[in-house]
Image (cartoon, rainbow, N blue to C red):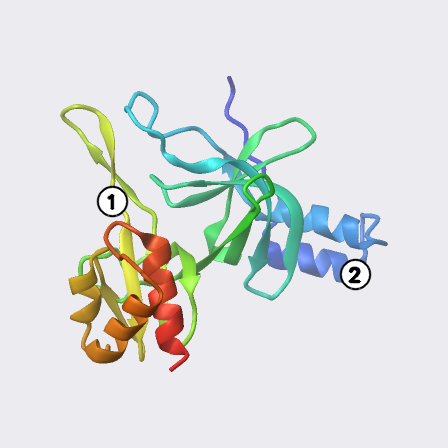
């Protein structure tokens, strides 16, 4: 199939065109949202991990919203996150074509799983770690506050057996510094900014077992931030 590209205007041009109301009917919020969507899509999506064993995606297609760097929010669109490429995908409702959203224009996004009754928030930022690419990445926000907890849901490839391997990183941030933490009680207690005595009280009181448990780690950090 002939490759096609969906981008026609960069975002600033879209916003300027809306403001001037030239060559379009931009009389409603819906019209503006459509123009923003078209300006955000860079190309048609093709799966770069085709032929590898493993699922590159985080969940199936879900409704959600995208927050742009300029503060605008595009709502009620169908999204999917590709963990292998760290790309946000958009499914166009009209013809079900898949596009890649231009990461440079995105501040964050939200996936809404109505069946599971949960919302997943993601932010885009640079991880301040020496072994991470200097490019900005999408991180799932688990806890915000004095100590924040975010998850980099990344995959890596195993070239010999053509498999996709989970390479998720758990990131705790404190006073502008990022730390990688494993899902272990000891790893949490060894963080230099954690008061071990107080954290142990929180773990006992709330019956939290950190081992391989993201939600328990999130609850522990959330309660610690309340001290």
- For label 1, the residue is 167
Question: Is label 1 in a helix, a strand or a loop?
Answer: loop
Q: Position of residue 172 (x, y in %)?
A: 29, 66
Do the residues under discs 2 and 1 have CB atoms within 8 angstroms?
no
Residue 195 is at least partly visible in this image: no
Q: Residue visible at 38% across and 64% down?
A: 219
Q: Earlier in the sequence, mark 2 or mark 1?
A: 2
Q: Is residue 155 above or below residue 196?
A: above
Q: Nearer the viewer, residue 44 or 84?
A: 84
Q: Nearer the viewer, residue 154 or 220?
A: 220
Q: Position of residue 140 (x, y in %)?
A: 41, 55
Q: Residue visible at 39% across and 72% down?
A: 223
Q: Which mark is residue 20?
A: 2
Q: Is residue 109 above or below residue 1?
A: below
Q: Position of residue 61 (x, y in %)?
A: 54, 35
Please tell me how crowded label 2 is: few (under 14), some (14-19), or many (20+) other residues with Cα within 10 Å.
Answer: few
Marks 2, 1: nearer the viewer: 1
């Amino acid at each position: 199939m002939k490759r096609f590209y969906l981008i026609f205007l960069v975002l600033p041009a879209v916003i300027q065109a809306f403001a001037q109301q030239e060559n379009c009917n931009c009389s409603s919020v819906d019209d503006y949202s459509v123009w923003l969507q078209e300006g955000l899509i860079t190309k048609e999506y093709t799966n770069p991990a085709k032929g590898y064993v493993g699922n590159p995606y985080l969940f199936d297609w879900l409704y959600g919203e995208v927050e742009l760097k300029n503060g605008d929010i595009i709502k009620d669109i169908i999204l999917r996150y590709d963990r292998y490429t760290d790309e946000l995908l958009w499914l166009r409702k009209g013809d079900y074509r898949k596009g890649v959203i231009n990461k440079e224009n995105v501040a964050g996004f939200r996936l809404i799983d109505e069946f599971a009754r949960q919302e997943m928030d993601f932010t885009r930022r640079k991880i301040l770690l020496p072994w991470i690419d200097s490019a900005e990445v999408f991180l799932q926000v688990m806890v915000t506050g004095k100590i924040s907890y975010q998850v980099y849901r990344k995959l890596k490839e195993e070239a010999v057996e053509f498999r996709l391997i989970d390479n998720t990183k758990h990131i705790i941030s404190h006073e502008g510094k990022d730390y990688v933490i494993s899902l272990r009680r000891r790893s949490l207690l060894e963080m230099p900014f954690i008061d071990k005595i107080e954290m142990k009280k929180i773990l006992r009181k709330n019956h939290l077992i950190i081992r391989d448990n993201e939600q328990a780690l999130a609850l522990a950090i959330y309660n610690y931030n309340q001290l």
